[in-house]
Amino acid sequence: MIYPKIEDCIARAEQNKYVLATMVSKRAKDLITRNAGQNVTGKEKQISSAMREIVDGKIMPTTTVNQNSRSK
């Protein structure tokens, strides 16, 4: 059983799997960078931590839309 469930994560990522992948990737890289000099012996991987933070609502999607492209 994988926790958190992918369906729960996608619900927080505007129902878009690409937005979810970007959110998880950026947060996991941030966690890796932050803990680079430390010897972390926890069982949970950075990707799992990032997904849990998304489900908990700690990480929210940020999307930017180019308004100029819509006016053409």
Image (cartoon, rainbow, N blue to C red):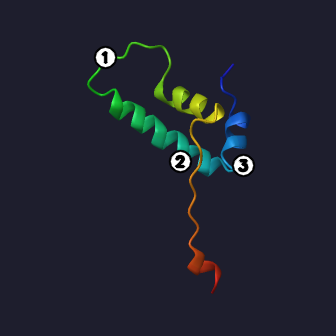
Residue visible at 34% across and 26% down in the picture:
35
Q: Earlier in the sequence, mark 2 or mark 3?
A: 3
Say which quarter of the image contains residue 31.
top left
Q: Amino acid at mark 2?
A: Thr
Q: Which mark is residue 39?
A: 1
Residue visible at 53% across and 32% down in the picture:
50
In the displayed structure, 60 sits above or below 70; it is above
In the displayed structure, 13 sits above or below 1; it is below
Quarter of the image where the C terminus is located: bottom right
Q: What's the distance in space between the residues labelled 2 and 3, CA to CA?
A: 13 Å
Q: Earlier in the sequence, mark 1 or mark 2?
A: 2
Within 10 Å of the Cα at label 2, are there few (<14), some (14-19), or many (20+) other Cα atoms? few
Within 10 Å of the Cα at label 3, are there few (<14), some (14-19), or many (20+) other Cα atoms? few
- Give x and y (percent) for residue 21: 57, 44
Residue visible at 63% across and 36% down in the picture:
57
Q: Which mark is residue 59?
A: none
Name the outermost residue toward the front. 58
What residue does disc 2 label? 22
- Give x and y (percent) for residue 12: 68, 42
What residue does disc 3 label? 15
- Give x and y (percent) for residue 51: 58, 32
Relative depth, front residue between 52 and 6: 52
Q: What's the distance in space between the residues labelled 1 and 3, CA to CA?
A: 36 Å
Say which quarter of the image contains residue 70.
bottom right
Q: Amino acid at mark 1?
A: Asn
Give the SS element for disc 2. Answer: helix
Q: Is residue 34 left or right of residue 19?
A: left
Quarter of the image where the N terminus is located: top right
Q: Is residue 44 left or right of residue 32?
A: right
